[in-house]
Image (cartoon, coloured by chain):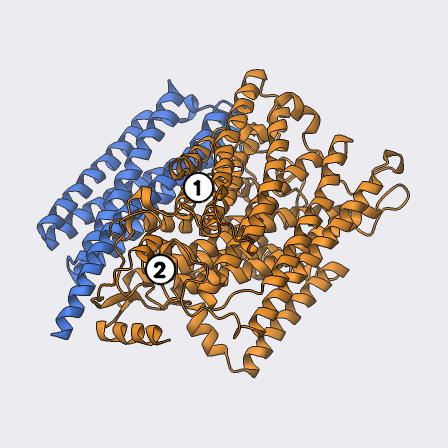
């Protein structure tokens, strides 16, 4: 009898905790959005300060970035599918869809790395001008977030496999998917402001 | 060697009088504490009861003790600045080199803002928010210990240059570029500055999220937003500002670091960088930050005035509206810190008018407190002393601020001692006096005995007189044209007399601080006479007084149901006693993980200051591993069974 009561107190605690965690994570996302905003502002100020170096028009390849964008958008879609599977309690599907998301996210990161590498090798690294400084910082900050997201996704998948879809792990996956969609939205802004407006 | 130690060499170890002195003080202090702990066999106690605790009441006390130590450190800097300015006239160049003097005023500003005021406030919020809203804990107990230990790591960083490097930033408390860039500050001083602020800033950000979720999600049943105590309201506003501005600070410091570490060009004056951008960004953080510091103190005054006037707070709604108004306006005034930058008349006019507007919600608060006292039976206790001191000082300083909000006047006063006097009036007379009032007011709640009244009054009068003695001359000096951060001036300026009066003032403040130390010693000695057995020594109004002093680990055996504002007052009036029904209580276990994470972050930061690549990666990987381990830990809570809760409650009621 006593044991059951304990479980009840703990269970209520866990349900309440999941709710608090979601709200808190939204607050965190908004703070992260503000740090992105600060770097965006820096980019907006510095984007024309090429200091005799190349501008976005000469450096960016839109088709390449478009592929990157589609990969990331698709990964958001598969992430959504994984969450639908989590609602149904289908562990196998969750793992499958998150694996797909992981692969897409990793490909995005590889492409971004390739782009950076190419720029640096050509002598257009972040030290070249104020414009390139802010470009590398903004896109790199997004890339860093993607990297952290992938790390999180990997651990979350292993734990889901091991522990199953409990209240705790579902709450964790929900926050992960929020994070992933959030990065997608930030990327849309980067795609528009940095790349499209940079080339137009 | 450079692979192992980066840029750190033997020459960076202490060899000047102040680094040797600083290092020796730090080492002797630590040795002394270690000796005491060993002698009294308290290591285990310290670790289990305090360092690894997730109880906000204990974390709050640790914050306050730590902030008090940092206050001593920051005050020492202040004394050194004053001494130099009082003597360095004409042919006498004082006892400090200009480079050393610059480092001292930089450290003084950062310590007082980040590690004293923020520390005290975090402490008070930890102690009181859960109790005032009828909750058992904060929303995220682990993040709370993490935030505390990050704050400690940041504080160690700001003192570490004594031991390694010998130089702190000589750039002023906000390290404006291009001066703080690699070209003009090549040493490690600015790097120490960056990582000290970055690490403690992330701690503040985490704490901000934690408090917002706690206040919005964990209030006792029935406590709607408009029934929250005023301190909870102002803290909520303050934390909303924290989560809005600390991300900007983090990004700005990050950009400055990229400039310095990798030679990028955000804020350099060549290669298309833009130093003005830094000044805008840092003040977008910096201006709301001063309201972050002051608003919780406004909440404390509101509680104190209502309790000691034995009346309901006058104009609750307008006080809440005022706090919200200040919060909103605080984001629209940052450019008044650099009217002289040349952004143009229209920009200056906008920011000048917005700055003037802030006086409105602030004035509303002042009038509400005065109206609360009207026809009240006022008890002139120590917290009320601090409140009256605040009322006079703050109004005075606010008027000075209003004067400077006009760009035309600001052109004459920009960067003079008038400005220095103004913001010290606001932060000492506003924020710090409020913190003192809060500490005296809530001291019995957390220790079980009141602070000595006599020594408290002495402390207050010395502080108040000392404050005006030291800062009134600075207002005058500002009008006479004395700029801030002045390590030397010509005798013909005729400033020395005022500088000496000012230096006398800080000694008087020092006597006040001494009185506070004596007060605590005397109070501990005579605690038997000042015991608080009821849990409600001041005839209080809000829920924290409904618990025993000190409160049990779970705060409330039964979560109270709230019907009105001043919930505890109403409860006392109605005198209905229902037999409590106890239930199992879930509480967080202790954890050392917050400490471990901070330790790894600290190591990574040290690597970043000294360009020690392996240490950076070691620190970062350690941080990630610790966080993942914590996230996967399934055993983070424990349960106090209802029977045990009942037993603990009986023990209190028997006394």
Does residue B162 appear in this view? Answer: yes
Helix, strand, or loop for circle 2? Answer: helix
Q: Quadrant of residue A158?
A: bottom left
In this orientation, which residue lies closer to the viewer: B547 or B355? B547
**Residue B301, percent across and down?**
49, 47
Helix, strand, or loop for circle 1? Answer: helix
Q: Given the image, what chain letter belongs to the residue carrying mark 1?
A: B
Residue B344 lies, with reference to residue B239, above or below; the image says above
Q: Given the image, what chain letter belongs to the residue carrying mark 2?
A: B
Taking the view exactly as shown, the residue that stands out farthest to the right is: B91
**Residue B572, percent across and down?**
33, 58
Left or right position of A69 against A86: right
Q: Quadrant of residue A62?
A: top left
Q: At 78% from the left edge and 43% from the top edge, which residue is drawn?
A: B487
Does residue B627 appear in this view? Answer: no
Mark 2 neighbour class, 10 Å CA radius: few under 14, some 14 to 19, many 20 or more: many
Which chain, by letter, is blue?
Answer: A
Mark 1 neighbour class, 10 Å CA radius: few under 14, some 14 to 19, many 20 or more: many
The circle on residue B141 is 2
Residue picked out by circle 1: B247
In this orientation, which residue lies closer to the viewer: B158 or B524? B524
Which chain, by letter, is orange?
Answer: B
Left or right position of B645 against B500: left
In this orientation, which residue lies closer to the viewer: B312 or B527? B312
**Residue B296, percent across and down?**
47, 46
The circle on residue B304 is none
Left or right position of B97 against B653: right
Q: At 55% from the left edge and 28% from the top edge, which residue is drawn?
A: B335
Q: CA distance from mark 1 to mark 2?
A: 22 Å
Quadrant of the snapshot with the N terminus of chain B: bottom right
Quadrant of the snapshot with the C terminus of chain B: bottom left
């Amino acid at each position: 009898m006593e044991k059951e009561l304990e479980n009840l107190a703990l269970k209520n605690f866990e349900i309440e905790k999941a709710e608090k965690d979601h709200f808190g994570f939204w607050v965190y996302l908004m703070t992260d959005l503000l740090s992105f905003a600060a770097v965006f502002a820096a980019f907006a100020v510095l984007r024309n300060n090429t200091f005799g170096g190349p501008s976005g028009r000469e450096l960016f390849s839109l088709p390449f970035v478009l592929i990157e964008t589609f990969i990331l958008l698709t990964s958001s879609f598969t992430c959504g599918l994984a969450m639908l599977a989590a609602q149904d309690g289908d562990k196998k599907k969750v793992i499958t869809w998150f694996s797909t998301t992981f692969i897409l996210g990793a490909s995005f990161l590889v492409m971004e790395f390739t782009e950076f590498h190419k720029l640096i090798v050509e002598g257009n690294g972040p030290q070249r001008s104020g414009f390139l400084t802010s470009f590398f910082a903004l896109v790199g900050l997004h890339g860093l977030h993607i990297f952290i997201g992938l790390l999180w996704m990997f651990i979350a998948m292993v734990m889901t496999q091991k522990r199953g879809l409990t209240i705790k792990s579902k709450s964790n996956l929900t926050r992960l998917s929020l994070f992933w969609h959030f990065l997608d939205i930030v990327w849309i802004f980067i795609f528009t402001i940095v790349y499209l407006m940079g080339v137009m | 060697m450079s692979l192992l130690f980066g840029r750190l060499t033997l020459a960076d170890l202490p060899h000047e009088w102040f680094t040797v002195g600083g290092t020796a003080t730090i080492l002797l202090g630590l040795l002394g504490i270690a000796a005491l702990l060993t002698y009294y066999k308290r290591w285990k106690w310290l670790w289990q009861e305090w360092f690894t605790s997730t109880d906000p009441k204990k974390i709050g006390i640790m914050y306050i003790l730590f902030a008090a130590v940092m206050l001593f450190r920051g005050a020492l800097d202040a004394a050194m600045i004053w001494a130099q300015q009082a003597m360095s006239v004409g042919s006498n160049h004082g006892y400090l080199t200009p480079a050393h003097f610059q480092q001292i005023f930089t450290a003084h500003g950062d310590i007082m803002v980040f590690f004293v005021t923020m520390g005290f406030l975090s402490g008070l919020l930890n102690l009181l928010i859960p109790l005032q809203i009828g909750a058992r804990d904060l929303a995220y107990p682990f993040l709370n210990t993490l935030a505390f230990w990050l704050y400690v790591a940041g504080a160690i960083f700001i003192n570490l240059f004594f031991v390694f490097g010998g130089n702190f930033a000589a750039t002023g408390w906000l390290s404006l570029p291009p001066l703080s860039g690699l070209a003009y500050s090549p040493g490690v001083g600015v790097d120490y500055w960056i990582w000290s602020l970055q690490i403690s800033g992330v701690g503040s950000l985490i704490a901000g999220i934690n408090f917002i979720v706690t206040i919005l999600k964990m209030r006792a049943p029935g406590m709607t937003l408009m029934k929250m105590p005023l301190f909870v309201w102002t803290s909520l506003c303050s934390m909303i500002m924290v989560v809005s501005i600390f991300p900007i600070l983090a990004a700005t410091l990050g950009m400055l670091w990229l400039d310095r570490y990798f030679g990028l060009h955000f804020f350099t004056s060549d290669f298309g960088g833009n130093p003005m951008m830094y000044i805008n960004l840092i003040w977008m953080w910096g201006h709301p930050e001063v309201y972050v510091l002051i608003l919780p103190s406004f909440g404390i005054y509101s509680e104190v005035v209502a309790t000691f006037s034995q009346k309901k707070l006058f104009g609750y709604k307008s006080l809440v509206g005022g706090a919200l108004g200040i919060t909103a306006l605080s984001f629209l005034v940052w450019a008044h810190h650099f009217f002289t930058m040349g952004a143009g008349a229209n920009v200056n006019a906008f920011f000048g008018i917005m700055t003037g507007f802030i006086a409105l919600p602030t004035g509303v608060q002042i009038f509400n407190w005065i109206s609360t006292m009207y026809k009240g039976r006022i008890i002139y206790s120590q917290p009320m002393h601090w409140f009256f001191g605040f009322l006079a000082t703050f109004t005075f300083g606010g008027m000075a601020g209003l004067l400077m909000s006009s760009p035309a006047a600001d052109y004459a006063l920009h960067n003079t001692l008038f400005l220095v006097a103004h913001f010290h009036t606001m932060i000492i007379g506003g924020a710090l006096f409020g913190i003192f009032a809060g500490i005296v007011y809530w001291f019995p709640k957390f220790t079980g005995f009141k602070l000595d009244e006599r020594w408290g009054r002495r402390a207050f009068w010395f502080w108040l007189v000392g404050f005006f003695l030291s800062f009134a001359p600075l207002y005058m000096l500002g009008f006479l044209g004395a700029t801030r951060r002045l390590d030397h001036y010509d005798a013909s300026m005729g400033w020395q007399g005022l500088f000496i009066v000012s230096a006398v003032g800080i000694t008087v403040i020092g006597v006040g601080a001494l009185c506070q130390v004596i007060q605590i010693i005397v109070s501990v000695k005579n605690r038997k006479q000042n015991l608080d057995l009821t849990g409600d020594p001041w005839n209080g109004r809000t829920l924290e007084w409904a618990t025993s002093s000190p409160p049990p680990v779970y705060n409330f055996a039964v979560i109270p149901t709230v019907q009105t504002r001043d919930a505890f007052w109403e409860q006392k009036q109605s005198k209905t006693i229902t037999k409590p029904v106890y239930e199992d209580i879930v509480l967080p276990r202790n954890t050392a993980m917050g400490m471990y994470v901070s330790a790894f972050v600290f190591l990574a930061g040290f690597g970043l200051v000294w360009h020690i690549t392996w240490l950076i990666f070691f620190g970062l990987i350690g941080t990630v591993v610790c966080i993942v381990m914590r996230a996967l830990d399934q055993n983070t809570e424990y349960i106090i069974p209802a029977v045990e809760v009942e037993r603990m409650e009986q023990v209190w009621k028997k006394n």
